[in-house]
Amino acid sequence: MRNSVEFKVYGDYALFTDPLTKLGGEKLSYQVPTYQAIKGIVESIYWKPTLIMVIDKIRVMKAIRMESKGIRTIDYSGGNTLANYTYLKDVEYQVRAHFVFNMNRPDLEFDRNEHKHHNILKRSLQVGGRRDIFLGARECQGYVEPCVFGEGESFYGGYGDIHLGHMVHGINYPDETGREQLEVRLWNAVMKDGVITFPRPEACTQVRTISDMKPKHFDHTNVESADQLLASWGEEGNP
């Protein structure tokens, strides 16, 4: 696919929190990452407001295992309290994603250099990303490296369909939708032989408004173009 990238992301722990479990101060991870969590990982590899990262598929490579830990959190009434967080343990996913230009950003038309953005994205992936990689929560450090999607054995290869239930798909931000409101998308996730194929955000029919929000303004003064960024690295430079 045009402007695509394929990589694996892995770590000792992950916490893709089911929001329903937050009400009592506890946290329980979904069995698999959400679209938004993987999008955040891609944006940690390389992010520009000019681009919208689109997650096509993920492949769950290892068995889904969980581990609970007692976490001492800050109590709003003062002091600390003890809560149970249930993490995914020893995770690895293959990801296929691509980018498109954010056409709701006419102020960034000067930065729409497709070839150079793709080169920067691939180079950033090779060095492990431009920012730290987190698997759903800051305490869950992750690592990324290039791969060929579909290579290697998945624990769930040949399992058939596994229905994962009603999940959060992702967040609609006003700068990506053109609507001055923050929205959440929901969907019914299905894993087929270890592969989850995500619908595009605009194809999600279950959308709920959270609050009003206006997009941040970007222009030449606070965004470095892809041409400038690539030129600043030089021929052998790293991000």
Image (cartoon, grey):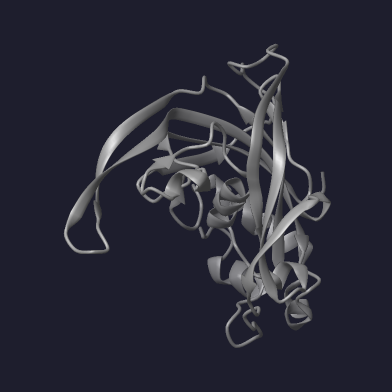
Q: Residue at x 81, y 51 (%)?
A: 205
152 vs 100: above or below: above
Q: Is residue 45 left or right of residue 96?
A: left
Q: Position of residue 198 (x, y in %)?
A: 74, 40
Query: In the image shown, does 76 or 137 lie closer to the viewer?
Result: 76
Q: Residue at x 81, y 71 (%)?
A: 103
Q: Residue furthest left?
A: 79
Query: In the image shown, does 172 or 109 lie closer to the viewer?
Result: 172
Q: Position of residue 217 (x, y in %)?
A: 64, 84
29 vs 200: above or below: above
Residue 17 seen: no
Q: Residue at x 69, y 53 (%)?
A: 185
Res 111 quadrant in image: bottom right
Q: Position of residue 97 (x, y in %)?
A: 70, 45
Res 5 quadrant in image: top right
8 vs 216: above or below: above
Res 177 quadrant in image: bottom right
Q: Exactly how many numbered labels are in the figure?
A: 0
